[in-house]
Amino acid sequence: MAIKNRPFPLIPVIAALLATVALPYAAVAQDGPQHGIAMYGEPALPQDFVALPYANPEAPHGGRFVFAEVGSFDSLNPFILRGSAPWGVNLLTVQSLLGRSYDEPFTLYAVLAESVETDSARSYVEFTLREGARFSDGSPVTLEDVIWSFETMGTEGHPRYQTAWTKIESMERVGERSLRFTFTEPDRELPLILGLRPIVQRAQFDVSQGGRSFADSSLTPVIASGPYAVSAVDPGRSVTFRRIPDWWGDALPFFAGQYNADEIRYEYYSDMSVAFEAFKAGLISVWREGNAARWADSYDFPAIQDGRARQVEVPHQRPSGMSGLWINTRRPQFADWRVREALLLAFDFERINTLVTGGAEPRIASYFGNSVLGMRPGPAEGRVAELLAPFADELPPGAIDGYALPENDGRNARRNRRAAMRLLAEAGWEPDDSGVLRNGAGEAFTFEILLLQGQAEILATAQAYVEDLQGLGITARVNLIDSAQYVQRTNQYDFDMTYALRLMSLSPGNEQYLYWGAEGVDNPGTRNFAGVQDPAVEAMIGAMLSAESDEDFTAAVRALDRVLMAGRYAIPFWFSPTSRMALQSNLHFPDVLPIYGDWTGFLPETWWYQE
């Protein structure tokens, strides 16, 4: 069953989205405290809205959702670098001052805060804490908890929190329940970023009063103010969340129709195939299918046939992001763009895509593909060209003139291989008498592809790629490790090549520094797996954050997209503009979907259980 995003044709939806994006930043001029804040223009929902447009306020509460995860976990603190915590901890137990509407590219509404205030220049932001908000243990959320959370996350927390903290000139209490942040530099996204910071209870981490250290990885649940609390933990195997009776957020229109399940449980499996069998047996509530070929031919099992489970397809309008093998340019053999282009030429996408997915999925063409933010083909023009011009002498080939991924339809495999060998020779790599590729020091070109256990599709892709590389005289080997080792090694960038997925939104901003910022080359724990260190990249991110019109913002994102693609930092796989899900028939979701489709904010937030 295919679900439409709206009960009317999709074209008007896209037009409405583009119209929303087209509102200039300069139109934002708040006057006093507001019920929400938007990156572009004004929030779409009025102050007296009764529910988010993609939630069903009549949805019943009750029932149990069980989700499958591959891997393991050894911590319940997702806010620090140490340990690996379940996804559900932050999603279900923690509430921030503002909440995101996934029906708008980037709009937040007051939730834990009752209002937000800023100026047209966004030189500051002020939040007023909502009365009556409580933590899961029943204690009130205070301004002291908010202040402590901001400071501790920014100084002791995961690196993803630190960039924004360095841009805060002052944090001051300006009333009984109000807190004001003044910024050190122009960054129009900062008020929204701070609004999404997790707020947790201060007392649990007060060592002087018997609390534990915030910096310690622990299986003790974090006390926060979200709709759920951890009710049971089987370390590394499962974690269960129970909905808090009389949760303070139930009275807010923002949460009407959200968080309907009484219990949500995450079961951890060592392998995707084992987890799929658990779904077929009725042990798992929902299964997201990432393989088009399997979706077409592997869903004839009894639960589907007798109606206990059903298949749905959910379209979306979000960017493709980047799913693929990331090349760690910190390694000397990958520092030269010509080597990375040769590695791209060796990847026979058409053959591998047919082998793994049946050839049904399109290839990812850029980091922001499938959206208005994606780079356009051919030479850079207009504002994009202006942004890139100061870096023309340093940019890799294709950034300005235009870059496209190598194609391989079977007829040009030899041509691609010859081109790859020429580039490798230019970079100092030549085959010896036995065909092994070596550099001037006689060292063979060998490397490791680090993968997480239990991802059969990724493993099959990597193994097929290893075969392609042999034709160039390159020896690659696949190393499968468990989730704890994977987190540790990738946090320290201890790999040659690895698989990762970088999701992109319709509102990219400061998180791009975490993905591509030069500080991530040496500082552990960022998402800069490729080791990107490029002044042009940082300049394009800065242009995004300081843009005062949607035209300038879009141009900056497209320019960033060009620089990243021309940098040849990843070997792109495929994506699907439609999400495929199989679910137990007693689970339901609204017919009206957010523009992001099946993403955060949709499952489990707006789903409900009903026989």
Image (cartoon, rainbow, N blue to C red):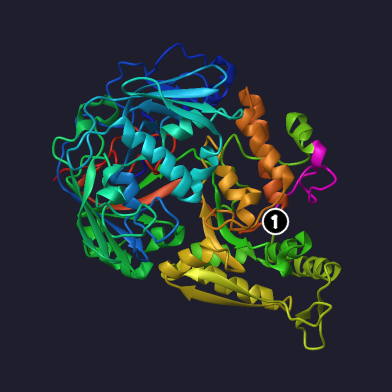
Residue holding disc 1: 568
Q: Residue 284 lies in what quarter of the image?
A: bottom left
In x, y percent, where is residue 419? 80, 65
- Residue 398 lies in the magenta stretch: yes
In x, y percent, where is residue 360? 52, 56
Above-or-below relation of 505 to 334:
above
The span picked out in magenta is: 389-404
Above-or-below relation of 200 to 256:
below
Q: Count all numbered tags in the image, as a single digit.
A: 1
Residue that sits furthest to the top in the current view = 31
In what quadrant of the picture does the C terminus appear? top left
Q: Please tell me which residue lies in front, 46 or 272.
A: 46
Q: Is residue 485 left or right of residue 428?
A: left
Q: Which residue lies at the image location 35% right of the left edge and 70% below the top edge?
A: 270
Q: Residue 589 lies in what quarter of the image?
A: top left
- Residue 13 lies in the magenta stretch: no
